[in-house]
Image (cartoon, helix red, strand yellow):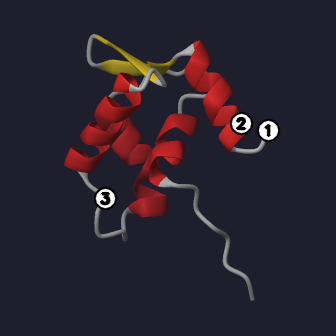
Amino acid sequence: MTMPVKPPFRLAVAALFLDGDRLSPEEVLASLAGEYARAGFFGPKVVALCLQCLSVNGILREETGRYLLTGYGRERVRKNLGG
């Protein structure tokens, strides 16, 4: 039996924004808890760091404590998800 493979964490975080939602770090944490909660690295600090990394690399943009996907980010996320 083959287990489904989870996407890399940063890609999973970025993919949350494909619908155009503006999410806070707490909302990202809650959205991924079901899939990643048992991973030893998962927690608020890692999510915050991941959001910062995605912002520095132009994938996300932060506005008043909420993040959104940039046009460049949308293109990269779709490409990496195979779509």
Badge 3 or badge 2: first in the primary sequence: 3
Q: Give the x, y percent position of residue 68.
A: 46, 19
Which residue lies at the image location 51% right of the left edge and 36% below the top edge?
14
In 3D space, how far apart are the residues under numbered discs 3 and 1 (Cα atoms)? 27 Å
Label ID, residue 19: none
Please name whichever residue, 40 or 52, is drawn nearer the observer in this view of the structure.
52
Q: Residue furthest bottom?
A: 1
In this view, the mark in front (3 or 2): 2
As measured in the structure, the alpha-carbon distance from the residue carrying label 3 to the one carrying label 2 is 25 Å
- The residue that label 2 is drawn on is 79
**Quick check: marks 3 and 2 in contact, CB under 8 Å?**
no
- Left/right placement of residue 2 relative to residue 44 reads right
Identify the residue position indicated by label 3 in the image.
42
In the rendered image, residue 48, in percent from the top left (x then y), is placed at 26, 38
- Kind of residue sitting beneath label 2: Lys
Task: Evaluate if marks 1 and 2 touch, with contact meaning CB atoms under 8 Å apart.
Answer: yes
Amino acid type indicated by mark 1 = Gly
Residue 8 x, y percent position in the rendering: 52, 55
